[in-house]
Image (tube, rainbow, N blue to C red):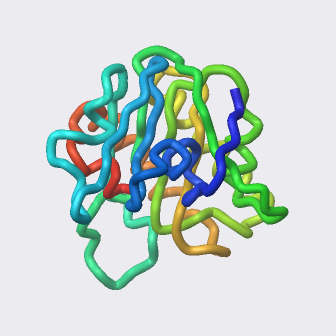
Amino acid sequence: KKVGYKRSYSSLPGFYSNEFLPNVKRRSLVQFAGGEEFKAILKGGEMEKKKGLAEVPGILCGTAKCGIKRSQKPLERPDLLLVVTKEPAEFAAVYTTNDVKAAPVKVSAEIEGKVSGIVANSGNANACTGEQGISDALEMSKLAGQLTGKGRFLVASTGVIGEPLPMERVRKGIGEAVANLGKAKGTEPAEAI
């Protein structure tokens, strides 16, 4: 089901919305898994150590350090996240109403029915990248499905606009995230995006 909410803060489908927690001034991470709503609220600038997306029953998370963003600095945190549901799941997503949509938004908005998870990267938004961006987003979804042996995956990207994704690094990172499924805990999944 596609559901729209007011005041979305991110292009990441279904993750950030003040509509769910109107009394919370800081952003809240909301993910639906098997029909259960999970909330990990940022407190004092830091997520509670025992709570995070990876602790949601029926969810496995894997991360990877790909070096997606071009930078001279050494990579200190993961920049690719793979979230996999144990069973295909219904999802709620928030998409921009802007006329200019990034490739992952266009690809994910076309998906209906159940999904097996989401593959998300930071460091490159895959926005304003034309047909190559669409092709890259489709490849990310397909590769996540193939390597996990599951069905369809939503795609999300955040970061630099107007540069194509470094797909060689992304492919390697998706493979690494699959190998790490179930190992990412606490705030690690959130740090990747």
Toward the front, the furthest residue is: 23
* Residue at point 29%, 55% (across, down): 42
Toward the bottom, the furthest residue is: 72
* Residue at point 40%, 47% (across, down): 29
- Left or right: 36 with respect to 55? right
- Left or right: 178 with respect to 34? left
Is residue 62 in view? no
* Residue at point 72%, 67% (across, down): 129
Is residue 47 in view? yes
* Residue at point 56%, 58% (across, down): 10
Look at the image and tell me in which quarter the C terminus lies.
Answer: bottom left
Q: Is residue 174 above or below residue 178?
A: below
Q: In this view, does 27 lie above or below 117?
A: below
Q: Where is residue 28 in the image (x, y as percent from the top left)?
A: 40, 50
Q: Position of residue 183 (x, y in %)?
A: 21, 36
The residue nearer to you, when weighing 161 against 135, is 161
Q: Would you identify the image quadrant in which residue 66 lies?
A: bottom left
